[in-house]
C-alpha cells in the first residue's frame, strides 16, 4: 500500500509536469489548427495508442456502468477542453489559469458529497487560499491592466467544476476493478463521440500536409501520446490510489511548471512576484497534502492488476 501511495504521488507530479508544458505545443499548433481540430487529433491519436498498448476489449459486468464511462468522457474529454479553449477566446489566459486552478476545491466538495470521502480539514482550505494567492501572483505577472469578460470567466469556472466531476466519476469507475488503461480508453471513446456534434457546428478542415509538417507532427505526438494517452492513464491511476482530493491539489503546480518552462524555452522574463507566487503555491500544496484531515479512503480493489 505504501509503495502504491508513493507511486501515486510520483505519477501525479509527472502528469502535472507534462500538462503544465502543453500550452507551448498548443500555442504553436494554433497557428495552423483550430482548438477543436487540435482536440480531435490529439484524442484520436491517444485512443489509438491505448488500443496498441492494451489490445483487449473491455467487457462490463453491468450495463449501468456504461453511464459512468459516458459521463466521464463527456466531462473530462469533451466539455472540459472545449470550455477551457472557448474561455481563452473571451478573456485573458491569466484569468482562465487562475479560475481553472480552483478545481481542487470543487473536487473536495464532489468527493465528500458523492463518494462519501472524509471532509478536508482546515489545513486543506488554508493551503487552497495560499495556492490561489500564489497563482494570482504568477498569472498576473505584475500587469496592472484589467480586462474581464463575464462569459469567459463563467466558462472557466464551469471547466474547473467539470474537471472535478471527471475526477470524481473516475474514482467511482476505479471501484469497478477494470484496468486503468481499458477504463481510460473507454472514456476517450465517449469523449470523441460527444465531440462529433461540435464538428458540425465549428467545422473541421485539416489536410495531411499540415499534420505531417515536422513541427506540427512532433507537437501533435506530444499532445496525443504524452499529454493525452499516457497522462490520462497516470492521472487516473493516481486518482484510484490517492483519492480525488489528494490528487487534485497537484493542479496547483501547473502555473509553476508553466512559468518555469516559459523561462527556459520561450525565454520569458520571471518577476519577483512570480518567484513569490511559486513559494505560496508550494506552501499551499504542502499544507493541502499533509495532515490526517486530507486522508481519503482507498478502495479495496487496489490490488487489481493494471494493464
Image (cartoon, grey):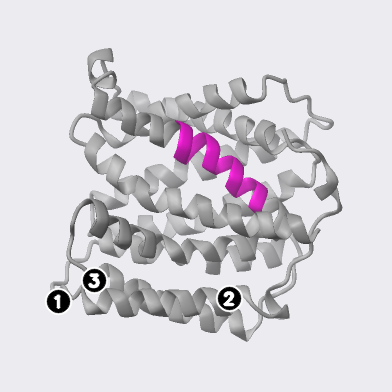
- Find the magenta span and give its range: 225-238
Relative to residue 268, is residue 12 drawn left or right? right
Give the residue at mark 2.
288
Q: Is residue 218 visible?
A: yes
The residue that appears at 35% across and 66% down in the rendered structure is: 98
Question: Does dot 3 land on a helix, a strand or a loop?
Answer: helix
For residue 172, above or below residue 135: above
Relative depth, front residue between 251 and 222: 222
Circle nearer the viewer, 1 or 2: 2
Which is nearer the eye, 242 or 89? 242
Q: Position of residue 60 (x, y in %)?
A: 79, 29
Among numbered discs 1 and 2, the one appearing first in the sequence: 1
Q: Residue at x 75, y 36 (%)?
A: 65
**Residue 140: mark:** 3
Q: Is residue 100 above or below residue 136?
A: above
Q: Residues within 10 Å of mark 1 (few under 14, many from 20)?
A: few
Amino acid at each position: 500500500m505504501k509503495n502504491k501511495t508513493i507511486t501515486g504521488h510520483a505519477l501525479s507530479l509527472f502528469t502535472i509536469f507534462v500538462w503544465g508544458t502543453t500550452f507551448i505545443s498548443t500555442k504553436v499548433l494554433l497557428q495552423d489548427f483550430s482548438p477543436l481540430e487540435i482536440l480531435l487529433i490529439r484524442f484520436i491519436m491517444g485512443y489509438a495508442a491505448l488500443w496498441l498498448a492494451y489490445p483487449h476489449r473491455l467487457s462490463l459486468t453491468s450495463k449501468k456502468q456504461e453511464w459512468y464511462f459516458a459521463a466521464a468522457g463527456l466531462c473530462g474529454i469533451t466539455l472540459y477542453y472545449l470550455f477551457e479553449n472557448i474561455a481563452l477566446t473571451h478573456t485573458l489566459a491569466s484569468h482562465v489559469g487562475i479560475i481553472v486552478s480552483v478545481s481542487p476545491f470543487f473536487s473536495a466538495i464532489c468527493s465528500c458529497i458523492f463518494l462519501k470521502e472524509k471532509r478536508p480539514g482546515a489545513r486543506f482550505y488554508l493551503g487552497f487560499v495560499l495556492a490561489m494567492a500564489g497563482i494570482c501572483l504568477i498569472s498576473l505577472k505584475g500587469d496592472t491592466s484589467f480586462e474581464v469578460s463575464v462569459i469567459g470567466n463563467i466558462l472557466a469556472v464551469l471547466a474547473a467544476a467539470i474537471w472535478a466531476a471527471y475526477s470524481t466519476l473516475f474514482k467511482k469507475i476505479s471501484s469497478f476493478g477494470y484496468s486503468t488503461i481499458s477504463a481510460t480508453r473507454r472514456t476517450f471513446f465517449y469523449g470523441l463521440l460527444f465531440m462529433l456534434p461540435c464538428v458540425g457546428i465549428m467545422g473541421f478542415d485539416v489536410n495531411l500536409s499540415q499534420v505531417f509538417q515536422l513541427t506540427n507532427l512532433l507537437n501533435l505526438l506530444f499532445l496525443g501520446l504524452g499529454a493525452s494517452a499516457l497522462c490520462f492513464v497516470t492521472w487516473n491511476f493516481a486518482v484510484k490510489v490517492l483519492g480525488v482530493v489528494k490528487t487534485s491539489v497537484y493542479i496547483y503546480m501547473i502555473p509553476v511548471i508553466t512559468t518555469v518552462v516559459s523561462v527556459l524555452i520561450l525565454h520569458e522574463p520571471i518577476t519577483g512576484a512570480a518567484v513569490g507566487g511559486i513559494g505560496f503555491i508550494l506552501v499551499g500544496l504542502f499544507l493541502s497534502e499533509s495532515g490526517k484531515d486530507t486522508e481519503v479512503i482507498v478502495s479495496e480493489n487496489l490490488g487489481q492488476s493494471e494493464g
